Amino acid sequence: MTDADRTPWIVGVSGASGTPYAAAVLRGLLDAGESVDLVVSRASRLTLLDETGIAFRDAHWREGLRTWLARGADGKPGTFEVAEDADVRHWAAGDLAAGPSSGSYPVKGMLIVPASTACVAGVALGLSKDLLQRAASVTLKERRKLVVAVRETPLNGQTLKQLVALDEAGAVVLPASPAFYAGATHIQDLVDFVAGRVLDAAGVPHRLYRRWEGELGGAQSRGD
């Protein structure tokens, strides 16, 4: 695929706990044949190191990403297979001249997974202090899809106001809140539910979780 044919989803990873959510969303996008532009904030690299032991570095980002996406939510390495030719482009968080910093750069939209309260504040206020926030501001001004998977608790009044502001600006505010009707039996199931809801909001097809079909007890009758 040439650059001229490429219309990716931007995936922004901020510093909140929840790097397995980001990994599941990335795998879902790639499994659906989507292209991805990845922005990993400086704060999220500390979270990734703490939660997985993976040191994500700009100079070796492909190796770090492959290791990250292969890891299960329980921390087990080698849980998932990652295609060598996955269409991912990485942009450094400090690169404010990067493609996603401009509205003329063609993308389908942006998914922020997970979104910290600091990230929420920056996007709501239009601070653009790094590429993640700038790309989100561009996404809003261009009226493209922006999904903000906020993952902090509890939320204070100021953050709630900022989330309302994002909703009013056209973003989808999607708390990282797993549901249990899908019959989760493993931590990965709970992570995949949230990732699936993010992909639902983006309109990307997937099979990450069992959908509600109007049948009580359906989770218990899955037989798996």
Image (cartoon, rainbow, N blue to C red):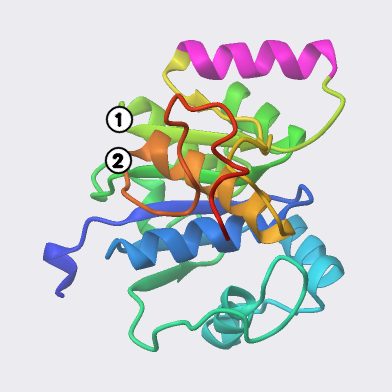
Q: Which numbered marker is on residue 48?
A: none
Q: Position of residue 1 (x, y in %)?
A: 15, 75
The residue drawn where x is 82% and y is 66% is 51
In this rendering, would 131 be left or right of 99?
right
- Image location (x, y in percent) of residue 202: 37, 39
Of 64 and 98, nearer the camera is 64
Residue nearest the observer in this picture, 219 or 75: 219
- The span shown in magenta is 156-168
Three-letter amino acid code of the residue under disc 1: Glu
Q: Main secondary structure of the magenta part?
A: helix
Relative to 172, does residue 206 appear above or below in the rendering? below
Sequence-first disc among 2 and 1:
2
Query: Residue 32: x, y in percent?
Result: 30, 61
Residue type indicated by callout 2? Gly
- The residue indicated by pointer 2 is 103
Please tell me whether residue 16 is drawn above or below residue 42 in the rendered image.
above
Residue 162 is inside the magenta segment? yes
Relative to 65, say whether 43 is above or below: above
* Residue 63 seen in the current view: yes
Callout 2 touching callout 1 (CB < 8 Å): yes
Q: CA distance from mark 2 to mark 1?
A: 6 Å
